Image (tube, rainbow, N blue to C red):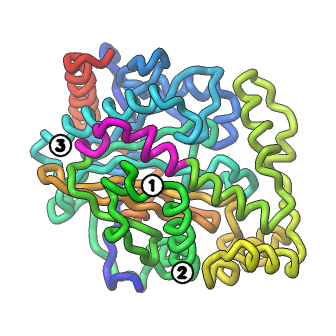
Amino acid sequence: MITKKVTTLTIPLFPYLRAGRRKPQETKRIRPEDALDLKEMLKEIRKSEVASFSVAGHHWSLASVFSSYSPDIHVMFLEASPNRYIPGPEIIPDREGEGLMKLWAATLELIAKRKTVATLHAGYNWSPRAWGREEEKTGFQSLPTKWHPHLWGWPAFGKLSSFARPIETSTLTPQERRLLGDNNYAKPFGVLIKKRMAETFSKGSLFYKLFPRRNWRIDGRGIYARFNLSVPQILRTPGFFSQVLKPLATMLEGIMCELTEVFTTIRCVDIDRILVATEKMCLKNLAILRATPVMRDEKAVRKIFIQSKYPTGLLESLWQPVWNRCHEKGDPADWWRKGFAYALIFKGPSRGGWGELRMMPGVYVGPGGVVEAEGCIIKRLEDKKFSEYEIRQKSKELQNMAEDLKELGFR
């Protein structure tokens, strides 16, 4: 069940004003196809780069977000090498990942110091194999070739009258209602994730020390657990990336690939081989990325589900959207998102010693990501920007935050 009312966010566009410039550089909205050309994509993102940092010898960009989730601070981190394909945290070396967690934590602590911020958020969207006419329109991982985690702060919603308002869920579109829990796939998906976590992490692991088994819950938006540290504290925990986030991401990637190959003749390794060629500017076989998937025989699929002991209800919840996509029948809003997707988000109060980790599976094409995983709906604006005064003020605040990070020793 979803609540009777839901918070809907409508945030103006924020073109970042770089230091020393009189006006923001015109920024185009980057689409998935643009992400196939790493060099050109990064050139566009540099217009919004606030600062860059070396993490284990790799160049990571701190960038402002043009289509923001918040009227307050919202930034993203992105590895800015033009010859490095990074679909998610599962392929990042441990040392680099641990350094990145320290950078995340420090950034969130600076955001938390702002009097206007009530809650902290850090997370990412994942769907690097979602290529096709409908998949590339919107939703989940907008830059499929570059993992770009988002960090932001939200003021208390009661003080956001001009940006956020509660609306009746009865006024939402069917797709929006589905994202917020009116679906039949999130709970069996959550059961599968919980089962795989038990197979991936031992009882005495750092993962279960931070997220005890008894804390995990499943609802219409996936699986979540409360933890007894602030979000910056848990990110800064020694070994957090190598022993928690990376194996968790690897497990989730494995589930998405496995189910894709159970239902269709898609070979994820073939998709990955094409995408990794972006490192060498070798953009061949794009038709394979966007090809209509071929569905396997129903008896064969059902047999695999029984043999693999998948959770009850998972097959029934996934069969129809996958069939719709493979046969390109019916309303595209009811099509499967090729390769599946997920959103992973940490959230907690800006002043408090607790937080929550949530993982939301993505099954359908269309909008979706970390904001919806939080139980909110965000409306994208294409023509309304913050005022010139607000743009200058917000840009200066971002520049001050970058200077503070450098004073903390990040270079």
> Farthest left residue?
115
Residue 173 in magenta?
no
Give me the residue at 28% from left, 73% from top. Answer: 166
Relative depth, front residue between 12 and 125 = 125
Task: Tell me the element at label 2.
Answer: loop
> What type is the residue that disc 2 sits on?
Asn
Give me the residue at 75% from left, 54% from top. Answer: 132
Q: Which residue was labeled with disc 1? A: 344
- Residue 148 in sight: yes
Tell me the CA gap for discs 3 and 1. Answer: 20 Å
- Residue 321 shown left or right of residue 303 in the figure: left
Q: Which residue was labeled with disc 2? A: 183
Tell me the CA gap for discs 2 and 3. Answer: 34 Å
In the rendered image, residue 30, in percent from the top left (x then y), is placed at: 58, 38
Mark 1, Cα crowd under 10 Å, few <14 / some 14-19 / many 20+, is: many
Where is 250 relative to 5, above or below?
above
- Residue 183 shown left or right of residue 390 in the figure: right
In the rendered image, residue 315, in percent from the top left (x then y), is placed at: 69, 79
Q: Quadrant of residue 144?
A: top right
Q: Which residues are magenta?
A: 232-249
Residue 234 in magenta?
yes
Asked if the residues shown at circle 2 and circle 1 are in contact, with their CB atoms under 8 angstroms apart, the answer is no
2 or 1: tag closer to the N-terminus: 2
Mark 3, Cα crowd under 10 Å, few <14 / some 14-19 / many 20+, is: many
In the rendered image, residue 146, in percent from the top left (x then y), is placed at: 57, 35
Q: Which mark is residue 112?
A: 3
Asked if the residues shown at circle 2 and circle 3 are in contact, with their CB atoms under 8 angstroms apart, the answer is no
In the rendered image, residue 206, in percent from the top left (x then y), is placed at: 36, 48
